[in-house]
Image: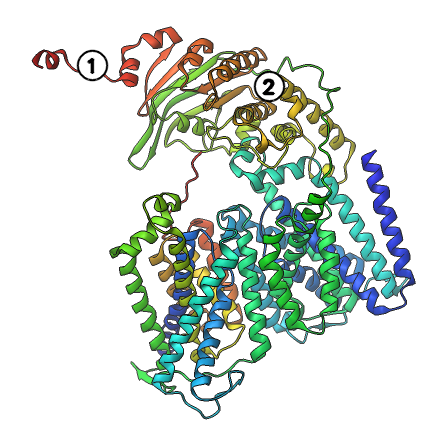
Amino acid sequence: MVGALLQAILSGLAVGGAYALVALGFSITFTTTKTLNFSHGEFVSAGAFIGMSALFLVLGLPVTSTTFGQALPGAGAQLLALAAALGVMGLLGWLLYAVGVRPFAGRPGMAWVMSTLGFGVILQSIGLAIWGPKPVVVPGPVGDEVIRLFGIGVRPQELLTLAVAVVIMIGFDFVMNRTMVGKAMRAVAANGNVASLMGINTNAVMIGAFVISSALAGLSGFLLAPIAQASLFMGLTVGLKGFSGAMIGGLSNPRGCVIGGFVLGVFESLVNLWQAQWREVAVFGLVILVLAFRPTGLFGKKLVEKV
Amino acid sequence: MKRTRHLAGVLLAAAALIGITSLFGNDYYLRIVFMMCVYYLCAAGMNVLVGYAGQKSLGQAGLFAAGAYAVALLTTRTELNPWLALVMAAGISAVCGILIALPSLRVKGPYLAMVTLAFGIVVEKLVGEWTEVFGGAQGIYGIKALTWDGQPLTSLQWVWLGIGLCVLTHLLLRNLLQGRFGRALLSLQADEIASSSVGVRVYRAKVIAFVVAAVTCGIAGALVAQQNQYINSDFITFHLSIFILLLVLFGGAGSQYGPLVGTVILTAVDAALARWPSAQHFLYGFLLLFALYVMPGGVTGLLSKWFRRSIEKPELSNADAAPTHIGLAGQGELLVVQGVTKNFGGVKPAQNVSFRLQRGHIHALIGPNGAGKSTMINMLTGLIDPTEGSIRFLGQEVSGQPVHSICCMGMGRTFQNLRLFAELSVLDNVMLGRHSRMTNGFFASLFHLPSAKKQEAATRARALQLLSLVGLLHLAHQPAASLSYGLQRRVELARALATEPQLLLLDEPAAGLNPQETAELGQLLLRIGKCGVSILMVEHHMDLVMSISDHVIVLDYGIKIAEGKPAEVQANPRVVEAYLGVDEPEEAFAAA
């Protein structure tokens, strides 16, 4: 029993790491531009598939193949795939900002909700046209042999996901709080107009926010693909849970978002242990419960509208 | 006249449509028309939610499922009459609508959109994975179809039923949206704080909008399930939610015929592309991404730009005279503020402040910037709760009461930074002020009962009277945002007067006005005072304050430092000190 519990907590933490990356991505665009990428989930899927296609290319298989067969990519190929996933997703983030967010940002009516959703639907339908709806088994960069740890079996990819997520969070926290770039981002978040008067290129900061946020989504997809198989539909729930994590932690607080992501991953994993079909209901129930008592999340700043 | 003409037009169009469909021998075309009816039902309700109340919902598929699975379970597990099942399905969807509306009371904007999206996904997972009840991808067979004369409806009869329901929905929603409720929903979309300050029960209005959207969507789902006599989890997808939203946005959110236009075009395109699902999805994505950029008002918005109708001429006939009396005649002490303290962390904009307001007087609340004047007004109107102390209005405690009920008690207000409903006309702004004084309820409005008609006419007449009082009658049909700043201030004043206040709170009414306009405002305030309204104004223009007020209260750093007649206050050394600072001690000069 204790073993099963520990197992659940550990895999919850691993998936939670992926949620935390997504949640952080939401937080970054929300604080700097007051907009969210509603197709963040599709970006997660896209990251997985771009990483996968890079692996196909390195192995000399056609991009449109849907299985690796016996081929096993080496470490170099995996690193290359990672770079490709991050790079292409960053570019997509920039494109999304240019066509879907900038024309609507700051205008009433939240038209950007629709446009970012539309961007995701387009990405997904392109993916469906190339690879079809079937999930693809992707070999992980650290092998698929289960490691025994304190008497429980752990997949190395899960440990990798957790480790990468933690490292990224710490690095991001350092950049935001200790460097000039971080200060500029926080200044734009606080008040874009004043920040631009201080000589900060707010447009560049906002593009940067979308690039980083999308790259994080891609990273999360890349890390999740070997755990859960790459599928064009995997992103929707990952994106939603990442957002739920962000809401539980408080969108305006990056550290809160990260904590929220991990909490949600572990919670989901524990519910899964008990009753698998109530997993989603329990997760979103938790979100609604938290919002009912703290509308801006556990660690979010209270919004006060000046009258 | 306009109403009967519209009714005749709609009935004629419906009759024509029924006639044309009777000539179709082809079940395929009948099916397309039936789906148009189904989607129109979804879109018409969704328009209330998105176009009027301004709440983006991305989970309508969940409500569609609620209706569909309700009839499925009711007719397969029980011996319920299919028609009754349809009605009950509408009721069940309404309950789900309330469920999905609950988060909207706490969260706004993107949060809400994401919560509704999550609701849709939860329902999708639930019907897909809880196979014992919902059958999952296997689905539920043997749903009883609606019957006529003991026989299941034919394809043609289904289409007729669909058209009939669409006409009914259109007429009822038109009734609802063209009067009190439509205005209230538009106002909360524009500005929730201003909306509640004119007496609109914001939460309740939002819940009603969610329920209307849920009921029409649930009926649509039930119709589809009953017509197919089958439902499975493949019907309930995120794409359905997006499609329903797109119907409204593409057609034109907030316009009367937008949902119809959107439904006809998109359902036809959908049917044409049915063989290529990925092309279909690509097109939706493309429309979502660019449609709002190219045409923010949807197709109808684009069309109305081309065929711009001339702006209605104001009817001067029934606005004979300015009102002589405003507000209910009340009794008892008007307002007693006792020991009120407010802390915002370390900032204390009110410390143990007490004062009384007299009936029929014009009171002024003055003080240097940061003295806590606006905070005081916000506490009186219920936007902020005081940390300590009591505020009694007409003998009743105000603090802790919701903003709209304080408005109903008879306190009207204007805002320091104008909060008009910018897109609405001047007349609609003022009519919204009377929202809390109108007594026609939801159903009276929905069915356009005589009471609703009478209330609406009375409100219109009163609004025109008030507009003539502030001298804006000739601008009644202009959008509020198109007026100059000074005129907008007067619109806000008229809107506050329309709430029939006994006490009118004005937060810097003369800010941004030139000396000429300020003097005119002074005269106007005196006239309003003569109509029986007591006034408390926060103001920096000392000439205005000193010339019209009967009593002046002075705050400085949250502390009341003086009160009394204007002349007394002017002579008070503490007031002079607060405004001009104190002279350096004389020794200092001597030393220099």
Marks 2 and 1: same chain?
yes
The answer to whether residue A44 is visible is yes
Residue sitting at 80 percent across and 49 percent down? Answer: B167
Q: Residue tagged by mark 1?
A: B583
Which element carries disc 1, helix, strand or loop? loop
Q: Nearer the viewer, residue B121 or A161?
A: A161
Q: Amino acid at mark 1?
A: Asp
Quarter assignment of residue B354: top left
In the image: residue B150, left or right of residue B178: right
Mark 1 burial class by Cα count in 10 Å: few <14, some 14-19, many 20+: few
Residue B342 lies, with reference to residue B135, above or below; the image says above
Residue sitting at 64 percent across and 65 percent down? Answer: B283
Mark 2 burial class by Cα count in 10 Å: few <14, some 14-19, many 20+: some
Q: Chain of mark 1?
A: B
Q: Nearer the viewer, residue B323 or A102?
A: A102
- The quarter of the rendered structure image containing the N terminus of chain B is top right
- The quarter of the rendered structure image containing the C terminus of chain B is top left
Which numbered dot is residue B77? none
Q: Amino acid at mark 2?
A: Val
Which element carries disc 2, helix, strand or loop? loop
Q: Residue tagged by mark 2?
A: B470
In the image: residue B180, left or right of residue B353: right
Residue B545 lies, with reference to residue B287, above or below; the image says above
